[in-house]
Image: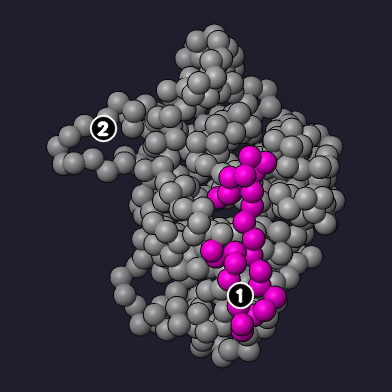
Amino acid sequence: MRQGWVLGFGLALACSTVAVAEPNEPPGEPLSYAREVGRELFAREWIADDPRSAGGRGLGENANAESCVACHSLGGAGGAGGRSRNVGTVGDLANVFGGMQATMVPQGVLSIGRPWDGSTMGSPRNPPALFGAGLVDAVPETALRALAAREHAAHPAISGRVSETEDGRVGRFAWKGHIASLEDFVAQACKVELDIVVERPGEPEPAADLRAEELTALTQYVAELPEPREVADQPLARRGEAVFTEVGCIACHVESVGPAERVFSDLLLHDMGEALSDAGFGYAESAPSELVAVAQEWRTPPLWGVRDSAPYLHDGRADTLTTAIELHGGEAASVVASWRARSDEDRAALDSFLRSLTAPM
């Protein structure tokens, strides 16, 4: 069994049958060198002792897959992954997350290609979509701190908070929101999911599989994956968006944040209740410091492109959007109660709205 860590919003994977999206270029002009390299790296199937790795060793024995696109392909290259691509958090979380986690879980708990059935000791993670990641990366910290300071009169239990790294930066990426920048996310995902040696800018690494300039190119490629789109105006979907606002979903799934328009996420940590808790998987039930995401806290996932990113929730346990809503607890309990109190027609309209949010391909 392969062992490995997963970072939630991780890059893990290539299928040669999956087309790789080309970032937008002016008509008639070729891709820039950096974009072309980034595209190739996203689709590349790494192997052990890879001849491409000058001085490095290539794909490591703890890799969760062979390329980025193998797990990020739903709706096109850069999309989410199916439940068969779930992996589990294992090993020394304090080391993986830069000292942010205070506890450990046993290694060797979950292999890729096997859905979590509750019988293992790993905390499952399902690969989310990367579409629009560059816009999320560009959201100002001030905007996130302002969202965290808001009060919700209709739903006073909702109190999202920013996730901070130890050096004071605001987290934007991963299911626990613990990664601050897209470059950090890409670098850590390559280290963890592909188990390759990554060189960071300004930090020479003679045994690197992925050199600093290649990391920059790969990050640029991911940053320029297009944001999801919406199906053309549909009366039922528009009614559903009104219901989405009226029942309170909009409190956490904020329509737009900075340049990320129609993202439907505040990118903050929220307590989602015991049903979605990571207790027992290396996450504390109470925080030893404000930097730590506790067992029941999760970053609000963006809903743009949600139609094409099933299964849902951090572990892919929900096959449908309705099931995902029903499993919301904690701060969202009053919102779910409001949703349940609506008519069947209103709930169907809300589902129609969510299903109008599609992948960009």
Q: Which of 52 and 154 is in front in this view?
A: 154
**For the residue labelled by badge 1, is the local secondary structure a helix, a strand or a loop?**
loop
Range of magenta residues: 146-172
Q: What residue type is labelled 1?
A: Glu
The residue under the point 67% across, 23% down is: 61
Q: Residue at 64%, 22% (x, y): give it.
A: 60
Q: Can I make out residue 65 in this image?
A: no
- 162 relative to 246, above or below: above
How many residues crowd around disc 2 within 10 Å: few (fewer than 14), some, or many (20 or more)?
A: some
Which residue is located at x 39 percent, y 80 percent?
238
Identify residue for label 1: 151
Which sits in the foreground, 272 or 75? 272
Q: Is 204 positioned to the left or the right of 24 in the image?
A: right
* Residue nearest the observer in this picture, 170 or 337: 170
Q: Which of marks 1 and 2 is in front?
A: 1
Q: Main secondary structure of the magenta part?
A: loop
Q: What element carries label 2?
A: loop
**Residue 119, position as x, y percentages in the image:** 83, 49
| Residue 292, placed above or below residue 297 | above
User: What is the distance, in whole Å, between disc 1 and disc 2 at their CAs?
Assistant: 46 Å
Label at residue 316: none
Magenta segment includes 161: yes
Callout 2 amino acid: Leu
The quadrant in which the N terminus is found is top right
In the drawing, what numbered circle is on residue 31?
2
Left or right of residue 106, residue 139 in this image = left
- Lateral position of residue 142 relative to residue 176, left or right: left
* Residue 110 highlighted magenta (yes or no): no
